[in-house]
Image: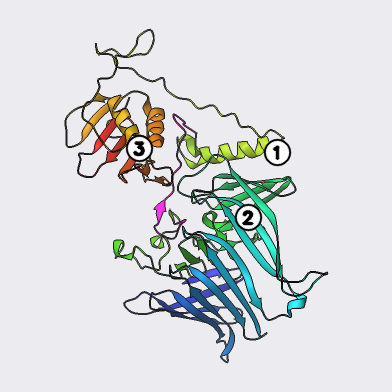
Amino acid sequence: RLSTKAAAAIADTFSYTSGTSQLLNHTTSPSIGAHVRTDYHYNGNGAMTWRSRTDVTSIWMALGSEEYGYSYRDLLKRYINENSSGGMVYDWRYRYNAMGEREQKRLYNQSLNDSLSLYPWVYYLLGGDKTPLAVYHGRQTKSAICSDTGRRVYVYPVEYLTNGLGWNGVPEQITQVITKPNGTKEYQISDHLASLRVAVEGSTIRNVDYDPWGNQVGTVVTGERQTFNCQEQDRENQFFDLSDRNYDPLIGRFTRPDRLLEKFRSVSPYAYCADNPVVLTDPTGKQAREMTMRMLPFAEPVGWGGETGGLGGGLVLGLAMIANAASGDHSLAVSYPHPAASIVHSDGSEGGEGKTPPPPVPVPGVKTGNDELDKIVAGATPGKKSSTRQFIKEGGLEQAVKDFDKIVAPNALPLPGKDGSMIGTLSGTGATVIVRPTSTEGSPTLEIQLEKQKPIKIRYK
């Protein structure tokens, strides 16, 4: 791999283990400066347990090593960094909740005299859907300091997180609002991968640029906790914490193989986003996917070049929120053009003025295991016969989204599909539910893929 950084050209050489796709070593050879080789070792589950750095420019000189320990769920539990030249050792520990989300990290031990140093903590307050609500920092004292008896942790808040118009599929939003303890607010704008691109705090504007793999280029911004793909990069090891796995942007690989590797046999189990990080994102470390915006009902935000539903509309809305906030107006009034709902009457005529649509024909005997879905089907008109049970309902996309929200499990985070659709799980049964903004006939649809029953498809006129 060849690249240019500043005035020096850099050549990276990678060596792999045959049959496992494990990276054995990586040598960075800049035209100016030291040539550094990094060696990697793995455990029986394929997770990286150790890596060492060596200066191989003229004589081999050890620069340092790192060790990684894992829990029974293969989540990173311990990280030890040893600086060979300075003799410093830093021991970090990580703790997770029952859902596997990291809720705490702290410096457990280090080489400095305990009476001269404090041990940092980070604590994450998570909501029921795993969304971060607040972030706290803390310091632990190990010895008596200022009449303290030691072994105490002092915790203080650094971020309160709220959201504006957002992406679905990731916990962070396109216009995330961070409230600091002193009351100041920071507004963040993200790109199509949910990566932070602009942060506005008062009169201060910070811009962030990345290479395709998430390494910052140009002026490096250090004051933001979440950057690439709206994920946190740990300063101690430079890995991005993606919930299930850790990602190393320097080599564009995960430190542990994919749990779902058998579903993607043609892709390396260590590869990030199937080696397509410009189009795909992987906010959980479990499965790469494209990012799409979930439009508000009938919303048609105008993107760059006049197209509808594009990223430009989202950025315009985000910038509008920031402009309002900067002027002291924290509300956002946005008008969305939308067509009038077309009503088809029994005589074949259309239009909503002065006419009332006929009452829906009840559909007897439809039992899906979800009471709300049964009511939705009962209020729809049977459609044409096919391999699926088809129905027709009024209300367009707005009603389709409302019905989708009624029947999906509240603790199942909907995922975006490639065509702008949203995918969820039917509450009580586990069946797949898909709402699509358009179909081959041009109307929104709600699809329910039931087990041991014909699928249900509702078209919204």
Q: Nearer the viewer, mark 3 or mark 2?
A: 2
**Residue 324 at what x, y percent from top left?**
66, 35
Q: Residue furthest front?
A: 149
Query: Residue sitting at 38 percent across and 20 percent down?
Result: 341
**Amino acid bearing label 3:** Val
How far, Cα to Cα, is label 3 from label 1? 37 Å
- Neighbour class for label 3 at 10 Å: few (<14), some, many (≥20)? many
Query: Residue sitting at 37 percent across and 13 percent down?
Result: 352
Name the element at disc 3: strand
- Residue 135: mark: 2
**Residue 21 at what x, y percent from top left?**
36, 74
Visible residue check, residue 445: no
Q: Mark 1 or mark 2: which comes first in sequence?
A: 2
Nearer to us in this view, 244 or 201: 244
**Residue 140 at what x, y percent from top left?**
70, 68
Residue designated by label 3: 435
Q: Nearer the viewer, mark 3 or mark 1?
A: 3
**Residue 84 at what x, y percent from top left?**
62, 86
Q: Is residue 278 above or below residue 9?
A: above
Residue designated by label 1: 326
Q: Is residue 268 left or right of residue 322?
A: left
Q: Mark 3 or mark 1: which comes first in sequence?
A: 1
- Residue 372: mark: none
**Amino acid bearing label 1:** Ala
Q: Is residue 118 left or right of residue 372?
A: right
The magenta stretch is: 282-302
How far, Cα to Cα, is label 3 from label 2? 34 Å
